[in-house]
Image (cartoon, grey):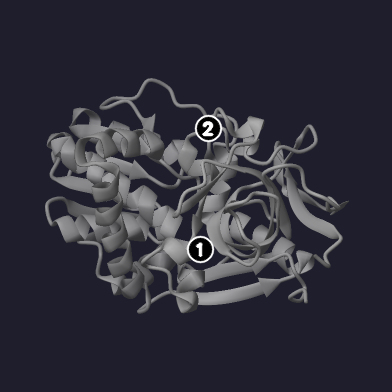
């Protein structure tokens, strides 16, 4: 191993635009069962901002602990084993999973199987296993080196969207005939609209900013699109479910007050409009509640069997990955300075909806 230091981007947990870059020495030797990953590439999307927004409530800040007041936002991407003191984890193998914005991550490997490596470090114990696992590329039938960027950008958020759509379906859509999807141009919303379209039951109503209407229309996933200031023009007598990716308390309140008892389920997921977050009073209709994907994975896995659930989800993702070829524009950003710049742009909502930002804290690939 030739690398000597890890370079990491952190954010202030109470002021996300404030960042710092840390350079810390790597361990010269590894303890029993420790594994060191080199982090090659990661996705940076509005999804990552949602992780910061729910960092305390859903525990995302705890994935990669650091100094008091600072946080390491989780991001999905690809890494390679560069050092291993675990007998079943070999140097050179490729893995996909959750990483901090960094050049390296050291884990305590455990529960190693043909398909997965888990981080069993003590601080991981309180989290759902899915958040502490790394998929081994060699065992993934969908792995395609040419599609690593798509996997980083889309795979994790697609899983969330697929599970949300499945959750609505097994609950008979709560009696609704339409699904409202806020932040319709976000990739998580696009994935949800795609899944809803494949099911073909609920009408798909996207809510977005005026500048993103044309892009959303070009996708062909939505039956109807409205801007945020047009939501009160929607048919208030229609039974609807809401999947909120925006996190705006003002918009959420407006929709509940407009639909009242016709709001049959209100599902909170994202925070693309994080500056508009705030407390919610007593709202008419179904009470807004956060969707926790691991809970649905557990319940559906018990019903279908884990293998069947993963097969269904994987097949759907493979089709969505092909669909994304028609609109996703991947952009690469290397080095701490560029990663910081793109982070600020994503945080401010200043990246084009079709763009997919792939980052690497490496200025150049190490030898």
- In the picture of the structure, the residue carrying the numbered disc 1 is 152
> In what element is the residue under mark 2?
loop
Quarter the N terminus occupies: bottom right
Q: Measured from the top left, where is residue 328 in percent x and y?
A: 43, 74
Q: Measured from the top left, where is residue 157 in percent x and y?
A: 42, 54
Q: Measured from the top left, where is residue 107 in percent x and y?
A: 67, 45
| One can see residue 255 in this view | yes
Count of numbered badges drawn on the protein: 2
Relative to residue 256, is residue 234 drawn left or right? left
Q: CA distance from mark 2 to mark 1?
A: 21 Å
Mark number, residue 61: none
Q: Check the image and report above or below for 272 versus 353.
A: above
Q: N-terminal of the two: label 2 or label 1?
A: 2
- In the picture of the structure, the residue carrying the numbered disc 2 is 127
Q: Check the image and report above or below for 62 versus 344.
A: above
Relative to residue 291, is residue 195 drawn left or right? left
> In what element is the residue under mark 1?
helix
Relative to residue 181, is residue 101 drawn left or right? right
Residue extending farthest to the top is 282
Q: Measured from the top left, where is residue 15 in percent x and y?
A: 72, 41
Residue occupying the point 64% across, 37% down: 61
Residue occupying the point 13% across, 44% down: 177
Quarter of image, res 241:
top left
Camera-nearest residue between 245 and 361: 361
Q: Check the image and report above or below for 365 versus 98.
A: below
């Amino acid at each position: 191993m030739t690398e000597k230091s890890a370079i990491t981007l952190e954010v202030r947990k109470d002021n996300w635009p404030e960042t710092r870059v840390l350079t810390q020495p790597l361990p010269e030797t590894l303890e029993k069962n420790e594994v060191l990953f080199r982090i090659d590439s990661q996705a940076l999307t509005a999804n990552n901002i949602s992780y910061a927004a729910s960092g305390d409530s859903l525990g995302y800040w705890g994935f990669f602990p650091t100094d008091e007041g600072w946080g390491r936002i989780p991001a999905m991407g690809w890494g390679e084993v560069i050092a291993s003191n675990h007998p079943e984890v070999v140097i050179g193998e490729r893995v996909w999973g959750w990483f901090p914005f960094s050049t390296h991550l050291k884990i305590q490997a455990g529960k190693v199987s043909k398909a997965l490596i888990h981080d069993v470090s003590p601080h991981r114990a309180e989290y759902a296993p899915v958040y502490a696992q790394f998929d081994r590329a060699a065992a993934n039938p969908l792995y395609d080196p040419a599609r690593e960027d798509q996997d980083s950008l889309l795979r994790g958020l697609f899983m969330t969207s697929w599970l949300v759509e499945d959750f609505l379906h097994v609950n008979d859509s709560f009696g609704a005939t339409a699904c409202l999807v806020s932040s319709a141009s976000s990739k998580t919303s696009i994935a949800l609209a795609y899944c809803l379209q494949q099911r073909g039951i609920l009408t798909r109503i996207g809510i977005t900013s005026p500048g993103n209407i044309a892009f959303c229309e070009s996708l062909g996933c939505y039956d109807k699109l409205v801007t945020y200031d047009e939501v009160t023009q929607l048919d208030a007598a229609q039974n609807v479910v809401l999947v909120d990716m925006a996190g705006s308390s003002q918009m959420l309140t407006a929709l509940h007050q407009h639909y009242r008892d016709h709001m049959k389920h209100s599902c909170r997921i994202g925070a693309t409009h994080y500056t508009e977050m705030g407390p919610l009073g007593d709202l008419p209709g179904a009470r807004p509640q956060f969707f926790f994907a691991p809970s649905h994975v557990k319940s559906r896995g018990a019903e279908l069997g884990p293998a069947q659930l993963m097969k269904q989800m994987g097949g759907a993702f493979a089709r969505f990955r092909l669909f994304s070829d028609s609109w996703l524009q991947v952009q690469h950003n290397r080095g701490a300075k560029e990663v910081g710049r793109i982070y600020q742009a994503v945080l401010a909502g200043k990246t084009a909806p079709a763009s997919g930002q792939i980052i690497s804290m490496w200025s150049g690939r190490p030898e």
